Amino acid sequence: MSTGDQAFRATNNNERWHEMTYGGALSFLRRRYTRDLTGVDVAVSGVPYDASVTNRSGCRLGPRAIRAASTQLAELDAFPFGFDPFGTLSVVDYGDCMLDPHHPETIPDAIQAHAAKIIENGTKMLTFGGDHFIAYPLLKAHAAKHGPIALIQFDAHCDTWEDDGKTLDHGTMFARAAAEGVIDVSKSTQIGLRTFNDSDHGFEILTAPWVHRNGIDAALEIITQRAGDAPVYISFDVDGLDPAFAPGTGTPVMGGLASWQALELIRGLGGLNLVGMDVVEVSPPYDHAEITALAAATVAHDFLCLLALKKGATPKKVGRL
């Protein structure tokens, strides 16, 4: 079997072979780079944009960092699932959305068109930001295909502060999406919040302290019952994690979720009608030992495992889980 550089040497989307974790061409989980979506279940793509931030920048470098942090996750069968997700699920790395940062007025439409092209024929999309504003055009593309979206938002911030409907701001876009009917707030939940807004805008809000006190199972019961059978989009801002677990982000807030809590919550969402996911706000210049990028890569990896389960992958159990 050929070894090395499967990102461009692989001939199909399901094969996986040995790579040096510290060498070789980088793609997410060593998936094949291609824009041929024939038979593809999930396309991974980056949106390297961070001109909507309100504090520290640098998350335009997030997609590259998340890909680099994923190499060990590609080495062994997935934990705790016990399978190779790519034996069941066809996943490719589609590369990054091409943007013109010198014409910021073009950014939202460029992202939406990029997403629409990927999902138009049934391929799901796993997106790496970039700042959280990118979720707005991504959600618009998904709502155009699936109807109003049940949003599950992991975040330190509500991102529902008001704007004029035109601002490129990573703290206001979900209020806009809700007002436009892109999000069905009656089926949506925000998890990990620890900043204040005068209105909940109709979202169910499970603050980080509430999750700490009440636990994973109680949170999952609320999230899943609220979403029902609606199309569900997960938007994971890494600042939903406490800065101890995700220092590499632009707007860190103390008291957040631990990485294990976030992973347990993600792993409990497999019964929902998952249509897409983004992982945003990874800012490598502020990261330490790549722990933020690793958290982001692992959350994204586990989302793919949920989709593999839905497609028929068989889990195996070793030890007490």
Image (cartoon, grey):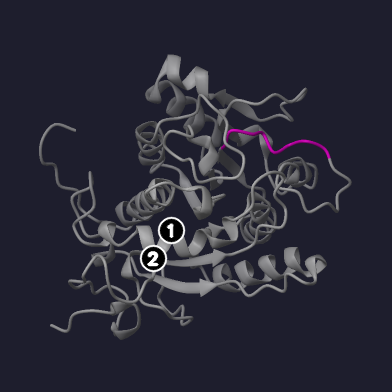
Q: Earlier in the sequence, mark 1 or mark 2?
A: 2
Residues 111 and 178: in front is 111
Do the residues under discs 1 and 2 have CB atoms within 8 angstroms? yes
Which label number is shown at residue 20? none
Residue 159 falls inside the magenta stretch: yes
| Comparing labels 1 and 2, the label whose residue is closer to the camera | 1
In this rendering, would 139 be left or right of 213?
right
Q: Secondary structure at mark 2?
A: helix
Residue at the image position 71 percent from the left and 26 percent from the top: 200
Pick whichever, 45 or 52, lies toward us: 52
Hey, which quadrant is residue 110 in on the image? bottom right
Tell me if mark 1 has few (under 14), some (14-19) or many (20+) residues whose alpha carbon lies within 10 angstroms of its own: many
Q: Main secondary structure of the magenta part?
A: loop
Seen in the picture, residue 314 relative to 197 is either above or below; the reply is below
Q: Position of residue 51 (x, y in %)?
A: 71, 57
Question: Which residue corresponds to mark 1?
Answer: 66
Mark 2 surroundings: few (<14), some (14-19) or many (≥20) residues within 10 A: many
Which amino acid does the dot numbered 1 rest on? Ile
Q: Secondary structure at mark 1?
A: helix
Toward the right, the furthest residue is: 164
Which residue bears the numbered disc 2? 28
Measuring 23% from the left and 52% from the top, which residue is drawn there? Answer: 78
Taking the image as drawn, is residue 253 in sight? yes
From this view, report whether residue 174 is shown above or below residue 93. Answer: above
Q: CA distance from mark 1 to mark 2?
A: 7 Å
Instruction: Please give the range of residues in magenta.
Output: 155-162
Outermost residue toward the left in this view: 319
**Position of residue 112 measured from the top left corner of the image (x, y, whole percent):** 68, 65
> Can residue 92 be found in the magenta stretch?
no
Residue 217 position within the rendered picture, expressed as x and y whole percent measured from the top left = 38, 24
Type of the residue with mark 2: Phe
Picture quarter with the C terminus: top left
